[in-house]
Image (cartoon, rainbow, N blue to C red):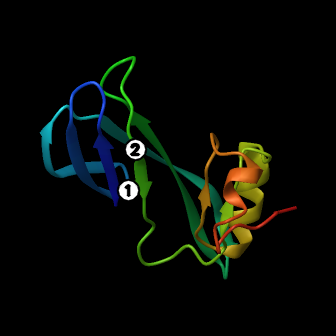
Amino acid sequence: MVYHFNHYPSPGYSKWDINGSTVTQIEGRGSQGSVTSSQSTASSNGHSGQPVYKYTVQLTMPSTYTQGPWFVALLGGGGAGHLSNAHSDAQADTWFSTRGGGMHLRNITTDAMKTSPMYVTGT
């Protein structure tokens, strides 16, 4: 689930559901960002012999000078934690392929993530 609240220069909000590579906008009003998702396989038999899929989700602001927060929720999984931009995509793939679901937030610094109870330093 992804939420976006836009407060400058034009107010608006959006809410999306992501299921694999399918993104469905649930609601929205005013100035809205956009969300895309793609799926690939991180490991064919990594977590308890089951395939592990990687979803790359792109969050895009509605315009150049737009300001407002994004909220991302991983429902029904994510026990392997959250990794910061200190990890490459390959490191994140390795981490999650044997531990199960989690989030690699490539644009969030380690310092910014330390307050998350799901933050892990990784390998």
Say which of 25 and 21 sits in front: 25
Q: Amino acid at mark 2?
A: Ser
> Farthest residue in the front direction?
8
Tell me where residue 85 sits by quadrant. Answer: top right
Q: Which residue is mark 1?
A: 20
Task: Check whether the beta carbons of the residues at disc 2 and disc 1 lie within 8 A of each other.
Answer: yes
Classed neighbour count for the residue bearing mark 1: other residues with Cα under 10 Å, few (<14), some (14–19), many (≥20)? some
Q: Position of residue 29 (x, y in %)?
A: 11, 41
Tell me where residue 8 sits by quadrant. Answer: top left
Q: Earlier in the sequence, mark 2 or mark 1?
A: 1
Q: Amino acid at mark 1?
A: Gly
Look at 58% across and 68% down and name the residue there: 51
Classed neighbour count for the residue bearing mark 2: other residues with Cα under 10 Å, few (<14), some (14–19), many (≥20)? some
- Left/right placement of residue 47 relative to residue 51 reads right
> Farthest residue in the top direction?
64
Task: Name the quarter where the N terminus is drawn.
Answer: bottom left
Q: For numbered disc 1, what is the local secondary structure?
A: loop
Q: Which residue is mark 2?
A: 37
Say which of 2 and 114 sits in front: 114
Task: Name the quarter where the C terminus is drawn.
Answer: bottom right
Say which of 120 and 69 sits in front: 69
> Farthest residue in the bottom direction?
48
Look at 36% across and 49% down and name the residue there: 21
**How far apart are labels 2 and 1 at the CA level?**
7 Å
Q: For numbered disc 2, what is the local secondary structure?
A: strand
Q: Position of residue 110 (x, y in %)?
A: 76, 51
Tell me where residue 47 sits by quadrant. Answer: bottom right
Look at 20% across and 39% down and name the residue there: 12
Q: Position of residue 96 (x, y in %)?
A: 69, 65
- Left/right placement of residue 107 relative to residue 63 reads right
